[in-house]
């Protein structure tokens, strides 16, 4: 029903729309992913070795679920990682040596024996938020200077299916001149990125920064001053909207940014590209899917778990002490061993919080699947009913749900 973008290994097809919401299929290198979809943040390498599933506390436990390890009672939750997000900058979260760094890059993630069962899409972020916005974080532990070329080498060596250029993220207090300068420097990186990634077979997403229409369209204008529009269109397959992390709990700002981004994409005639929104909270996912976001990534299932919060739903995290585990039929809550751990009967915090994070992720993935199924019916009322049911009990969210219904789904009658 709508245009399909076709490159040798990358294809995105929108199959159904209801209001601004769209359901489609993203096909990359032979793997398909139904959209809208949520990519959990993963740290495939967290300073450890193969024996420790490459280490990483709570990330280690999530990886154990991903591969169905015996340490997590053989619970295989691999299906919930059909897409996952890793940041290049997470390599710097642990003080790894040059030797360890080289080992991590020696073979793509999915070609390692440990992860052979894993068949999801891996989105590898550029880490611009950390490398370029934050003093003192760089690749110096393993003696690599972080620049566009180095970041691309890491993304491709790890076997990313979706990658982005290294951008200069804007900050809420940047002046207009700062923003233009950052766009100009990002344009230089885009030049380098497109030339070094010619042989790359996965999908390349262009990072877009901005909170509103004028910021995003100016960003694209500055970029196309030095990278011609035709080159941009040929070189990229999707948009990754960034810079929203400081606003991740401000639902109004998120809705505006996404709505304006869709408008800018339509004007630049790239609205048939998939739109990914970087770093949101899982609670915002159903709302953002309803206004036309195709994929997003989130780590709130982990942060909530660390804070002792268990999702009754993505909009209703409750204290772990108040949970009745028999209410949930997810494989984590069905395991007596894992329920004991979630109750606090374990030596290490990761063994307590890890299963909670996995349960939270399963709840978030079910929620997004439910939204997707409503969109796939093409019936606007089905999606409106869903938003009503999901948010009617929630004072804060209800307002945003109504806003989305009015703005994108034709309103109530
Ligand atoms: Zn559960």
Image (cartoon, rainbow, N blue to C red):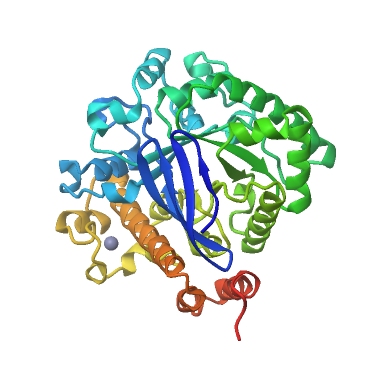
Q: Give the number of marks.
A: 0
* Residue in view at x 56 percent, y 19 percent: 196
Q: Nearer the viewer, residue 170 or 191?
A: 191
- Residue 86 vertical position relative to residue 374 in the rendered view, above or below: above
Residue 5 left/right relative to 28: right
- List x then y, in percent, for residue 73: 16, 48
Can residue 13 be seen at all in this image of the molecule? yes
* Residue in view at x 41 percent, y 16 percent: 97
- List x then y, in percent, for residue 138: 56, 23
- Residue 140 vertical position relative to residue 241 in the rendered view, above or below: above
| Residue ranking furthest to the bottom | 413
- List x then y, in percent, for residue 162: 47, 36
Query: In the rendered image, which quarter is residue 259 located in?
Result: bottom right
Say which quadrant the C terminus sits in: bottom right
- List x then y, in percent, for residue 399: 61, 75
- Residue 281 vertical position relative to residue 235 in the rendered view, above or below: below
Q: Nearer the viewer, residue 370 or 225?
A: 225
Q: Nearer the viewer, residue 328 or 274?
A: 274
* Residue in view at x 59 percent, y 74 percent: 405
Residue 284 left/right relative to 411: left
| Residue ranking furthest to the right | 177
Residue 264 left/right relative to 13: right
- Residue 150 vertical position relative to residue 247 in the rendered view, above or below: above
Ligand 1 falls in which quarter? bottom left
Q: Nearer the viewer, residue 257 or 338?
A: 257
Can residue 133 be seen at all in this image of the molecule? no
């Amino acid at each position: 029903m709508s245009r399909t973008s076709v490159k040798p290994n990358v294809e995105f097809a929108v199959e159904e729309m209801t209001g601004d919401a769209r359901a489609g299929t993203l096909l990359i290198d032979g793997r398909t992913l139904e959209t809208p979809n949520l990519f959990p943040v993963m740290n495939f390498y967290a300073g450890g070795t193969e024996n420790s599933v490459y280490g990483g506390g709570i990330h280690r436990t999530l990886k154990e679920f991903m591969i169905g390890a015996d340490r997590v009672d053989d619970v295989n939750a691999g299906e919930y990682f059909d897409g996952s997000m890793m940041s290049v900058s997470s390599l710097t979260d642990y003080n790894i040596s040059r030797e360890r760094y080289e080992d991590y890059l020696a073979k793509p993630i999915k070609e390692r024996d440990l992860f052979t069962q894993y068949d999801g899409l891996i989105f590898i972020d550029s880490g611009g938020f950390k490398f370029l916005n934050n003093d003192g974080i760089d690749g110096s532990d393993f003696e690599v200077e972080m620049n566009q070329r180095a970041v691309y080498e890491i993304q491709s060596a790890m076997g990313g299916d979706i990658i982005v250029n290294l951008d200069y993220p804007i900050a809420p207090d940047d002046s207009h001149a700062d923003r233009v300068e950052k766009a100009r420097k990002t344009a230089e990186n885009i030049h380098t990125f497109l030339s070094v990634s010619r042989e790359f077979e996965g999908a390349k997403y262009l990072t877009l920064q901005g909170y509103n229409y004028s910021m995003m369209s100016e960003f694209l204008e500055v970029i196309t001053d030095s990278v011609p529009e035709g080159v941009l269109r040929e070189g990229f397959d999707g948009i990754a909207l960034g810079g929203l992390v400081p606003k991740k709990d401000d639902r109004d700002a998120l809705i505006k940014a996404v709505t304006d981004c869709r408008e800018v994409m339509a004007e630049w005639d790239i609205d048939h590209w998939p739109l990914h929104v970087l770093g949101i909270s899982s609670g915002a996912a159903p709302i953002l899917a309803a206004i036309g976001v195709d994929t997003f990534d989130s780590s709130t299932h982990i942060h909530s778990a660390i804070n002792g919060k268990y999702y009754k739903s993505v909009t209703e995290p409750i204290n772990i002490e108040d949970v009745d585990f028999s209410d949930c039929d997810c494989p984590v809550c069905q395991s007596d061993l894992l329920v004991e751990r979630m109750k606090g009967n374990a030596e290490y915090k990761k063994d307590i919080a890890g299963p909670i994070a996995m349960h939270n992720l399963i709840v978030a993935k079910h929620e997004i699947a439910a939204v997707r199924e409503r969109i796939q019916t093409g019936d606007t009322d089905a999606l409106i009913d869903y938003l009503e049911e999901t948010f009617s009990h929630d004072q804060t969210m209800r307002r945003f749900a109504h806003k989305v219904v009015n703005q994108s789904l034709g309103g109530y009658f």
